[in-house]
Amino acid sequence: MPAFSMKCYRVFRMDSNVVSALDNIKVVLVGTTHTGNIGSVARAMKTMGLSQLCLVAPKTVPDGQAYALAAGASEILAAAKTFETLAEAVADCALVVGSSARSRTLSWPMLDPRQCAKLAIAQSDKPVAVVFGRESSGLSNEELQLCHYHVCIAANPQYSSLNLAMAVQIVCYELRMAYLEHEPVPTDTELAAYPSSEQMENFYQHLETALQHTGFIIKQHPGVVMTKLKRLFNRARPEEAEYNILRGILTSMQRLEKVDSNTQKE
Ligand code: SAH
């Protein structure tokens, strides 16, 4: 008997490369000020087996200090992708988790790092993003609303704000633990397909336009209806088939309006 147990880790085939679940989980840094933090994040990622780093509107591009702190993880830094907005960085993701040290005015489904990691690994057949905010002010409410869940690292309530790279290290460690423990999914089990973040944004725009046409939302005084609806749909997490039904309903409403307005004109 071998003294170790053979475990089958989850791998996906993407274009002819074999990619592990951890390679399908992006770490997204928004508006980072200190390049040293970006380098330390790259190192935190590599030690835990992650490789996809995205930078959203960084205040400065990775410099010598970033490479010094990345140490042996310089290739992650060199391959980091830069985006202007968070929406662009997570457009292809079906699961987006935003990390925050504080609870905001608008409550959102919360996870601890362990729950976050289990969910991310379970759903990593499609790109997943874990998003980290600015050193000075974290993520804006608008950015947090792009996320399906928020993850909070339990810390001293009197001082709960970790250094950015240390927060990334804790989440990446949990991702690694979840990856190592993950039971292989039986190949005959159908995993639910979820729409990407970009598809959901298109749906919200479609919904807002339809609700403006019906007069439920007044363009000049939109209020918080869309924010509440986004929270509702984020909580429900429609699957791809349900998403198509929702889009179909909106299109049918708009078709009806056109018929009505044509009838009124006649
Ligand atoms: N001063 C900021 C915190 C910045 S720390 C604020 O008050 O929001 C930089 C980033 O590290 C945060 O945006 C968050 O993504 C992450 N972070 C720091 N502490 C955290 C914690 N306790 N739980 C979850 N994320 C945390």
Image (cartoon, grey):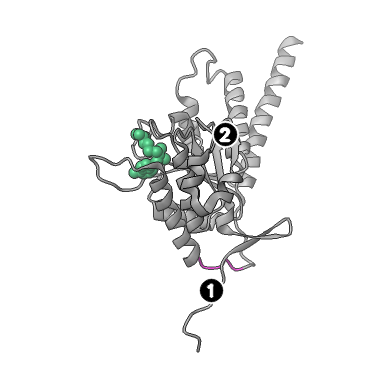
User: Would you say 50 lies left or right of 244 here?
Assistant: left
Place of residue 31 in the rendered image (x, y in percent of width and height, measured from the top left):
48, 32
Residue 138 in the image, given as x and y percentages of width and height: 40, 34
Name the residue located 64 percent from the left edge and 67 percent from the top edge: 188
**Rendered residue at 59%/36% (across/down):** 82
Tell me how far mark 1 sits from mark 2, CA to CA: 36 Å
Residue 242 in sight: yes
Split into quadrants, the picture shows ligand 1 in the one at top left
Amino acid on which the number 1 mark rests in the picture? Lys
Query: Which quadrant is home to the C terminus?
Result: top right
Q: Nearer the viewer, residue 49 or 189?
A: 49
Q: Residues within 10 Å of mark 1 (few under 14, many from 20)?
A: few
- Classified by dominant secondary structure, the portion drawn in magenta counts as loop
**In this rendering, is residue 49 above or below 228?**
below
Q: Which residue is mark 2?
A: 87
Task: Give the x, y percent position of residue 255.
Answer: 71, 26
**Residue 131 shows up from this direction:** no
Which residue bears the numbered disc 1? Answer: 7
> Residue 260, located in which quarter of the rendered image?
top right
Q: Amino acid at mark 2?
A: Ala
Residue 128 lies within the magenta run = no
Mark positioned earlier in the residue sequence (1 or 2): 1
Q: Position of residue 52 (x, y in %)?
A: 57, 49
The quarter of the picture where residue 20 lies is: bottom right
> Which contiguous range is marked in magenta?
182-186
